[in-house]
Amino acid sequence: MALCPRCRYLVEAQAIRCGHCGLILKAYGHPGIPLHRATGDTSLCLTCAYHADDSCTFPQRPLAQTCTIYQSVAAQGSVAPRQSPPSPWGFKQVWPWLGLLGVSVLIVWVVR
Ligand code: SF4
Ligand SMILES: [Zn+2]
């Protein structure tokens, strides 16, 4: 059993529409395709993982009020912050060259 998001009436989990207020609960009349709905005026996209990782190509983005593939960011845990690529001048990138330079200077100093 589930609650109708509009009237809070108890409905069958597989119900295609709410028996009390008639709200469509499943997409395309198929009990296996959930139809996620925004609450209030807030777009679903604002809390959707596909919006967060910029992978959604649905035309209703970013203003979707209903969506069949909505995936809550909260359900997936926090979105990992994107890491910037390492700087070519970071310590890890430069120290091998400094080591090579040091060995070269040592060889020149020993040879002369
Ligand atoms: S999958 Fe749906 S809710 Fe998510 S960003 Fe795309 S349109 Fe919005
Ligand atoms: Zn209802």
Image: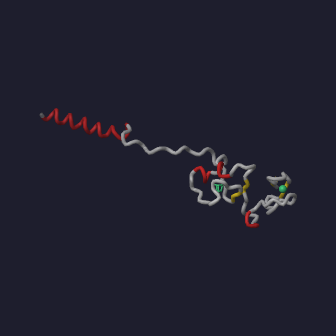
Can you name the residue that lies furthest to the right here? 20
Q: Where does the image place residue 50, in percent across and percent down from the top left?
A: 61, 54
In the image: residue 74, left or right of residue 9: left
Q: Give the tally of numbered discs.
A: 0
Instruction: Please say if 29 is above or below 48.
Output: below
Picture quadrant of residue 24:
bottom right
**The one of 109 and 62 positioned closer to us in this rendering:** 62
**The one of 94 and 87 positioned closer to us in this rendering:** 87
Quarter of the picture for ligand 2?
A: bottom right
Q: Where does the image place residue 73, in percent across and percent down from the top left?
A: 64, 48
**The one of 11 and 7 positioned closer to us in this rendering:** 7
In the image: residue 58, left or right of residue 41: left
Instruction: Please say if 30 is above or below 55.
Output: below
Q: Where does the image place residue 34, in percent across and percent down from the top left?
A: 73, 60
Can you name the residue that lies furthest to the left here? 112
Q: Residue at x 73, y 55 (%)?
A: 37
In the image: residue 76, left or right of residue 1: left
Q: Quadrant of the C terminus?
A: top left
Q: Quadrant of the N terminus?
A: bottom right
Picture quadrant of residue 109:
top left
Q: Residue at x 65, y 58 (%)?
A: 60
Picture quadrant of residue 69:
bottom right
Q: Residue at x 54, y 43 (%)?
A: 81
Q: Where does the image place residue 77, in percent across and percent down from the top left?
A: 63, 45
In the image: residue 24, left or right of residue 49: right
Q: Residue at x 76, y 67 (%)?
A: 29
